[in-house]
Image (spheres, rainbow, N blue to C red):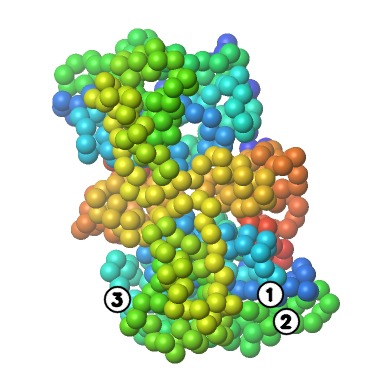
């Protein structure tokens, strides 16, 4: 039985920008400090979302002059009204469960999801820029100076594909985001990255493409599909998130039956797996 | 801070693990099924664990089998395959990986042998333990033998249809007496893999992967050699174990263990921020 990690009715009143895992001081004053912001529905968060951050960290270290100082997940607000969107409080809780024990550097920002109105991504990035650079003056280097942190979007190629699809994004927003911030894009099976980047050529210097060495297309859509079909989601999402989904009957057909721990199976395990308790001969 | 699980085992003190094996089913007209995954598991990954979950879903929805148990059987050190670390480590990592499961078990019997054991012999061992000595499984239609079947990725089946790899007698023995649940794998043409195994197809069940996933132990080892993150590809306790024992490093080189005081968790990307925060 997991304890709630967010207050039952979180409000914007008691909001503070999370910095508990923000690096206090850079290791290398020559590098440019970088903050990664992943925007999305996260309904639910999956291992692939978490892998994105790890892959980007490897990429930044091996292929760029950036030094990552923090990573944040910013779940979209309920106003977005996308299919399969569980309530913001649940999505925040699941994200928090995923990173609490499961990561040492990723944080969950609740500013965007707690707002009642929908916030465009450009504004979300502005918010991070304001909190990190305006309010805090950036990050310290080892010689005592403070450096402005480069804020960038971290996303899968599918999100970038929407940017090159006419009518989805406001062109001014695309320009604003890619010119002032930039993006780290993780390749995704099923998305032609070249096609996705084709209409974004003028900003290509600010777009970094990370290849997935492990083909992986765990998607939240599939997690929700599996749940509706009573199929196992174990090992696709972190265990505490599996528990949470079961306990709150999320994504089931009609809040359908769950493999409650009282019949001995662990939440999220296949219903085809044996139920312990009748093992005695 | 050791995370070793069981103390060093020998064949003398070996006991077949039955704690998570069901001895009775209540559904009518179902045949009890035990899934056996044989492999190197160097190291075990989330995809290995997913295989079991997928097979259980498949059995429930598409067959008249009812799963009563599942085992991981690590190959012994005599196999001498690239990338194989000591059997003891591999068994420990598997045990850590299934600790949180209610139905997956690790059987160290195969790994405890100094000589290499053919898969056919390993399956015989399970049949012996579960059906011959264990007396099978109680069903509404009386005592039944549990069907023992191999659980594997399509890559393993592909080796069965590659000339010279398997002894044809073993293939015949396994597929005739036991059977196989095969999980489709990106990069393997399943039809091609099954092409020369036509006579056995009624005993071969093909499970489609609805999530394309090619986490492989080979890639995990590659990432480790390149100092790259393996987090979220293998279970966290396994990441910790690999770090603590310096497994799969280029030359046992420095690892991102939390002992270096940098505050990062084991296996995390070295490009991720570490150290004092906030």
Tell me the tag on residue A147: 2
Q: Are marks 1 and 3 in contact (CB under 8 Å)?
A: no
Query: Image point 54% across, 39% down: which residue?
Result: B217
Task: Determine which of the numbered discs, if any, sits on residue A74 in the image.
Answer: none
Left or right: A63, with A194 as reference point: right
Query: What residue do we see at 33% from left, 83% from top?
Result: A167
Badge number at residue A81: 3
Would you call the spot at circle 1 few (<14 residues within 10 Å), some (14-19), or many (20 or more)?
many
Residue at figure coordinates x 64%, y 41% from the top left: B242
View extreme (front): residue: B163
Lower sequence index among marks 2 and 3: 3
Chain letter of disc 1 in the image: A
Image quarter of residue B182: top left
Residue A234 position within the rendered picture, expressed as x and y whole percent measured from the top left: 39, 47
Q: Is residue A263 left or right of residue A129?
A: left
- Which chain is indicated by disc 2? A
Numbered disc 3: what chain? A
Q: Position of residue A202 (x, y in %)?
A: 52, 82
Closer to the N terminus: mark 1 or mark 3? 1
The residue lying furthest to the right in this view is A143
Residue matched to label 1: A33
Instruction: Tell if the residue under mark 1 belongs to the same chain as the one under mark 3.
Output: yes
C-alpha separation, residue under disc 2 versus residue under disc 1:
7 Å
> In the displayed structure, does residue A152 sit left or right of residue B18?
right
The answer to whether residue A7 is visible is no
Q: Spatial distance from mark 1 to mark 3, Cα to Cα?
A: 34 Å
Taking the spot 38% from the left edge, 59% from the top edge, the residue there is A190
Task: Return the disc, 2 or 1, that comes first in the chain's sequence.
Answer: 1
| Pointer 2 with pointer 1, Cβ within 8 A | yes
- Position of the C terminus of chain A by quadrant: top left
The image shows residue A68, relative to residue B229, as above or below, that is below
């Amino acid at each position: 039985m997991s304890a709630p990690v967010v207050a039952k009715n979180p409000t914007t009143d008691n909001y503070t920008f999370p910095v508990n895992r923000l690096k206090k001081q850079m290791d290398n004053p020559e590098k440019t400090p970088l903050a990664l912001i992943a925007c999305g529905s996260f309904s639910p968060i999956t291992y692939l979302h978490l892998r994105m951050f790890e892959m980007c960290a490897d990429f930044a270290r091996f292929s760029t002059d950036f030094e990552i100082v923090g990573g944040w997940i910013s779940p979209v607000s309920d106003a977005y009204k996308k299919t399969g969107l569980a309530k913001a409080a649940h999505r925040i809780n699941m994200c928090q469960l995923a990173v609490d024990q499961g990561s040492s550097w990723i944080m969950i920002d609740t500013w965007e999801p707690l707002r009642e109105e929908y916030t465009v991504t450009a504004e979300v990035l502005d918010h991070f820029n304001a909190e990190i650079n305006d309010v805090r003056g950036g990050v310290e280097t080892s010689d005592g100076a403070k450096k402005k942190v480069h804020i960038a979007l971290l996303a899968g190629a599918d999100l970038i594909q929407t940017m090159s699809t006419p009518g989805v994004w406001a062109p001014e927003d695309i320009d604003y985001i890619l010119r002032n911030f930039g993006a780290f894009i993780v390749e995704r099976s099923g998305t032609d990255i070249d096609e996705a980047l084709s209409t974004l050529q003028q900003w290509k210097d600010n777009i970094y493409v990370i290849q997935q060495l492990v083909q992986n297309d765990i998607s939240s859509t599939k997690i929700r599909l599996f749940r509706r079909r009573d199929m196992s989601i174990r090992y696709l999402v972190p265990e505490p998130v599996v528990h949470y989904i079961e306990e709150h009957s999320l994504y089931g057909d009609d809040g359908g039956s769950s493999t409650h721990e009282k019949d001995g199976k662990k939440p999220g395990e296949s219903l085809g797996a044996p139920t312990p308790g009748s093992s005695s001969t | 801070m050791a995370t070793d699980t069981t103390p060093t085992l020998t064949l003398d003190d070996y006991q077949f693990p039955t704690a998570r094996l069901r001895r009775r089913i209540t559904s009518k007209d179902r045949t009890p099924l035990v899934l056996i995954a044989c492999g190197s598991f160097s190291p075990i990954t989330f995809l290995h664990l997913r295989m079991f979950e997928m097979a259980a879903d498949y059995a429930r929805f598409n067959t008249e089998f009812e799963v009563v148990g599942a085992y991981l059987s690590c190959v012994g050190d005599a196999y001498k395959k690239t990338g194989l670390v000591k059997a003891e480590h591999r068994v420990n990592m598997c045990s850590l990986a299934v600790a949180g499961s209610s139905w997956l078990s690790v059987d160290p019997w195969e790994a405890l042998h100094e000589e290499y054991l053919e898969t056919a012999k390993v399956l015989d061992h399970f049949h012996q333990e579960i059906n011959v000595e264990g007396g099978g499984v109680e069903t509404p239609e009386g005592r039944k033998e549990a069907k023992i079947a191999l659980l594997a990725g399509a890559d393993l089946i592909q080796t069965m249809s590659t000339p010279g790899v398997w002894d044809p007698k073993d293939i015949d023995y396994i597929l005739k007496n036991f059977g196989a649940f095969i999980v489709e794998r990106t990069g393997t043409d399943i039809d091609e893999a099954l092409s020369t195994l036509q006579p056995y197809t009624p005993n071969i069940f093909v499970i489609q992967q609805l999530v394309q996933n090619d986490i492989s132990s080979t890639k995990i080892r590659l990432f480790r050699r390149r100092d790259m993150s393996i987090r979220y590809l293998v279970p966290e306790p396994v990441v910790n174990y690999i770090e603590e024992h310096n497994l799969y490093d280029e030359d046992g080189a420095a690892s991102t263990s939390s002992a270096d005081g940098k505050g990062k968790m084991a296996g995390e990307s070295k490009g991720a921020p570490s150290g004092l925060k906030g």
